[in-house]
Amino acid sequence: MKARLWIILLLTLCLSAWGCGIIHDHDDAKSSEDIDIGYGSAGAPCIYLYPEEAGEVSVTLLPSEDAWLTSTDPEYVDGWTVWAEPDGRIDGTYDYLYYSSEVAMDFQMDEGWAIEAEEIFAWFEETLPKFGLNQAETADFIDYWSEHLLYSPWYLVYPQYNDLVAGQMDIAIDPEPDSMLRLWLVIDKVDQREPLTTPEFTPFERSGFTVVEWGVVLRIETEGKEAGSVTT
């Protein structure tokens, strides 16, 4: 009889502990260890198409579970199907395919540059060709971000190439390109210079049907005052 009472008492204590949250299942323990890495706004990724011969090209964006599109131009339904010319003209109207999105801040943040506000656009002009952008693509980048980059005394600029970009926003292109550069720059606003490991530039050679994409990811701020725009 005493043994049965001890067993009942022990079971009661275990059930009470479970109900009070002392005992956690495996999933709860795993979720408690998750780190919130935050979200960023992928502003104006622009996709340039340079086929060897004029023809129809289909482009489909494949967001990760933590990413979604917020705007596109031209209109994007289940993808873009466009007529592309060797000089990059699209449907006789566009120079590039435009979209914006929100993505998880799951990028490399170890290698980059600290650039002062007064130097940022001169730095873009000098550095973007080293990544592989041509003169027109560099000019488009600077034109857009001279109006949309919020002011900061300093910027930390972290380059993200094809694989890291695809981790948040994969892409399917038909016909498949022979060479493709996807370059996103994660840019953080900071008050002072911070030491960073300087990256090495990865050579990009254009050959055959070439696709080039540039974009900027800005951390979505949930607090603090709003800054003004940077001007050249």
Image: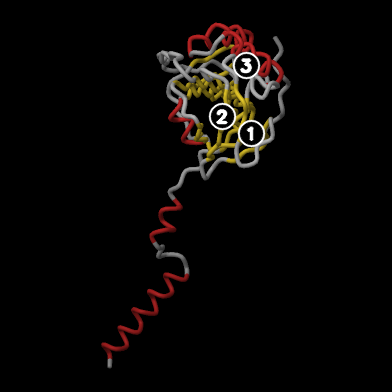
Q: Secondary structure at mark 2?
A: strand
Q: Position of residue 113 (x, y in %)?
A: 49, 15
Question: Which residue lies at the image location 55% right of the left edge and 23% below the top edge?
Answer: 213
Front position in the image: 196 or 157: 157
| Mark 3 or mark 2: whose residue is earlier in sequence | 2
The label number, if any, that marks residue 141 in the structure image: 3
Marks 3 and 1, how far apart in space? 23 Å
Question: In the image, what residue occupies the spot 47% across and 43% down?
Answer: 35
Q: Residues within 10 Å of mark 3 (few under 14, many from 20)?
A: many
| N-term mark: 3 or 1 | 3
Placement of the C terminus among the 4 image quadrants: top right
Q: Kindly report the distance in space between the C-alpha atoms of the residues bearing marks 3 and 2.
A: 23 Å
What amino acid is at disc 2?
Val
Which is nearer the eye, 127 or 136? 136
- In this rendering, the label closer to the viewer, 3 or 1: 3
**Could you say which is closer to the camera, residue 169 or residue 102?**
169
The residue drawn where x is 64% and y is 8% is 118
Asked if residue 38 is positioned above or below residue 181 in the image, the reply reads below
Percent position of residue 150, x then y? 68, 22
Q: Vertically, is 116 above or below 69?
A: above
Indicate which label's residue lies in the foreground, 1 or 2.
2
Amino acid on which the number 3 mark rests in the picture: Phe
Amino acid type at circle 1 is Glu
Identify the residue position indicated by label 2 in the image: 57
Using the image, determine if residue 90 lies above or below residue 79.
above
Where disc 3 sits, the SS reads: helix
The residue singled out by tag 1 in the image is: 221
| Figure colour scheme | secondary structure
Q: Disc 3 or disc 2, which is closer to the eye?
A: 2
